[in-house]
């Protein structure tokens, strides 16, 4: 049975979509079967995988509103073992359409339960706001991955998200837990950045990933080409750091193969599963 991660933060611009795309691409290259669920009406995960929204016949909106089964909304990406339930602008209408539905917070969970056994990992890209789509994602997932910036205001956003997780855990999903906090766009030269990391580690021991994702031009460029960083520039520092992050997520040693150091992405399709 696969593990479902909601990648969430109530603050926007923290790298949720970038994290979903790049972790999924790496795990797929390792032989894991991965499903991405784009639960943000902006549809950035969809376009980040090079999928044109106008070509989409069924989307997350159709899944949440019961117009289609999730199996029928899943489409393959062009990247190894990575599939996606795409999003279009129509997803913004879920807030209104599901408002009077008694089972509105369980819509995504019930759909994902029908396909959970078919994937090793499922990643839900949540919108940057507390609404019906985010709540559905938190109810449906096993763990929450929290990308955040090492900035003062980010601490407020983390506090708000933690309160939301507590509410969802006590009312809808008793097994919900934080799977890890990922610092993105990180600049270790800044004192405030290191102070924020220390503060978060103080209150969330063993939850902060050791790997920090730096500000990196190539990471920023990759989405405009519809590619994960590993397929866009496998020699970049950004690719190296996302690979190390995935090693950490998988519980593997935090090192790259000796011949692969300095960020050269080590594709090995047969090494992912025992």
Image (cartoon, rainbow, N blue to C red):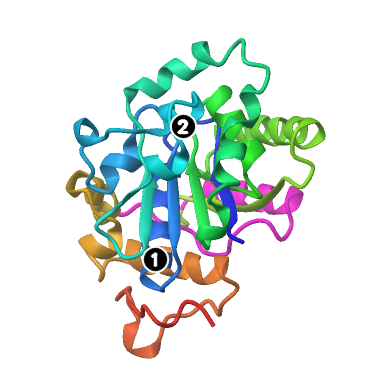
Q: Residue furthest left?
A: 225
Q: Is residue 125 left or right of residue 50?
A: right
The quadrant in which the C terminus is found is bottom right
Instruction: Say few, some or many: other residues with alpha carbon within 10 Å of mark 1 (under 14 / 14 to 19 / 20 or more).
Output: many
- Residue topped by disc 2: 63
Q: In the rendered view, does 157 fall on the left or right side of 23?
A: right
Question: As drawn, which residue projects farthest toward the bottom?
Answer: 258
Q: Residue 212 location in percent, x, y? A: 49, 59
Q: Is residue 166 above or below residue 28?
A: above
Q: Nearer the viewer, residue 38 or 154?
A: 38
- Residue 14 image offset from top left, x and y in percent: 45, 40
- The residue indicated by pointer 1 is 28
In the image, what residue occupies the spot 50% across and 59% down?
A: 119
What range is drawn magenta here? 190-216
Is there any visible trace of residue 194 in the rendered image?
no
Query: Residue 127, percent across and down?
Result: 47, 31
Is 18 situated left or right of 153 in this image?
Answer: left
Q: Residue at x 65, y 50 (%)?
A: 143
The CA distance from mark 1 to mark 2 is: 24 Å
């Amino acid at each position: 049975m696969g593990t479902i991660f909601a990648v969430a933060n109530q603050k926007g611009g923290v790298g949720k979509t970038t994290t979903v795309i790049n972790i999924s691409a790496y795990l797929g290259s390792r032989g894991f079967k991965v499903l991405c669920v784009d639960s943000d009406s902006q549809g950035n995960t969809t376009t980040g995988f090079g999928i044109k929204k106008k070509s989409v016949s069924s989307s997350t909106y159709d899944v949440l509103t019961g117009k289609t089964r999730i199996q029928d909304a899943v489409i393959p990406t062009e990247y190894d073992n990575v599939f996606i339930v795409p999003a279009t602008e129509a997803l913004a209408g879920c807030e209104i359409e599901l408002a009077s539905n008694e089972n509105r917070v369980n819509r995504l969970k019930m759909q994902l339960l029908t396909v959970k056994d078919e994937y090793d990992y499922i990643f839900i890209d949540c919108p940057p706001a507390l609404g019906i789509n985010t709540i559905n994602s938190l109810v449906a997932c096993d763990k929450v991955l929290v990308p955040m910036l090492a900035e003062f205001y980010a601490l407020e956003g983390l506090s708000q998200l933690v309160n939301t997780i507590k509410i969802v855990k006590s009312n809808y999903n008793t097994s919900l837990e934080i799977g890890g906090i990922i610092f993105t766009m990180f600049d270790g030269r800044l004192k405030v950045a290191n102070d924020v990391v220390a503060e978060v580690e103080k209150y969330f021991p063993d939850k902060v990933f050791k790997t920090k994702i730096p500000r990196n031009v190539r990471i920023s460029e990759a989405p405009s080409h519809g590619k994960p960083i590993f397929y866009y520039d496998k020699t970049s520092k950004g690719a190296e750091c996302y690979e190390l992050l995935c090693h950490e997520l998988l519980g593997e040693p935090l090192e790259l193969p000796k011949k692969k150091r300095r960020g050269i992405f080590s594709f090995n399709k047969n090494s992912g599963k025992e």
